[in-house]
Amino acid sequence: MAHIVRRLQFDAVVDAEKDLPGDAPVSAPTSNRSVHVDQSYFGAELVRDYKLGQLGLPDDVVTKLKAGRWGIVNLWRPLDDVTRDPLACCDARTVDEEDLAAVYADLPESLTKANSGYKFAAGSRSEAWEVKAGNGSHKWYYASGMTPNEAMLIKQYDSATGVAKRTPHCAISTPDDHGPVRQSIEVRCLCFWEDQ
């Protein structure tokens, strides 16, 4: 569905963009240290509808896909050994719905011409979630020392009931951080289950 490559140091990007106006596009993707879910439930529907619209499928096929179980899953993989800013995921069972705050992004069409990792989303609208701080019940996990031979699947949305619907995640700093900037690729997949 889409991909983004992250290869710049977080602090360097923050410093480079601190004096830009609020409506300036992010020019350089970096590891994201804010706790977030890439799409809210509504945002996931926006992404699904936008992507299905691009495919030009017959209406009856689109209706069938929307009626069944569907979801958005990211495949995250480091391009080099991870020695700093590992990716952490929060156990969805420990994050209450009240811990989620909607964040909106209207991405300009001009991003198609920008030297940016966000070209894939140009001209679209999305709604994501930031996770509010202060809930001491959140349980966090991360895989230390990941290599390019390993990957992590991160559920952004699942329409099924009785399962985890989303996974808050972010990059974290650890006392063991050393070496070069973490480089990774993230592929976002729109998934449909035929039998559910």
Image: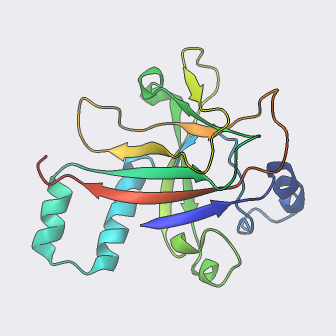
The answer, for residue 23, to whether it is visible in the render is yes
* Residue 196 in picture, x, y percent from top left: 13, 46
- Quadrant holding the N terminus: bottom left
Q: Nearer the viewer, residue 140 or 181?
A: 181
Please tell me which residue is depicted at 49% across the width and 70% down the height of the picture: 124
* Residue 182 in picture, x, y percent from top left: 74, 50
Q: Is residue 18 above or below residue 141?
A: below
Please tell me which residue is depicted at 70% across the width and 68% down the height of the picture: 25
Q: Is residue 52 above or below residue 159?
A: below
Seen in the image, is 40 located left or right of residue 191?
A: right
* Residue 12 in picture, x, y percent from top left: 87, 55
Seen in the image, is 30 located left or right of residue 168?
A: right
Residue that protrudes farthest toward the front in the picture:
149
Residue that protrudes farthest toward the bottom in the picture:
113
Q: Nearer the viewer, residue 105 or 35?
A: 35
* Residue 24 in picture, x, y percent from top left: 74, 69
Please tell me which residue is depicted at 33% across the width and 62% down the height of the picture: 48
Seen in the image, is 64 located left or right of residue 25?
A: left
The answer, for residue 46, to whether it is visible in the render is no
Q: Is residue 125 above or below residue 59?
A: above
Seen in the image, is 132 located left or right of residue 63?
A: right
Q: Is residue 18 above or below residue 110?
A: above
Q: Quadrant of residue 155?
A: top left
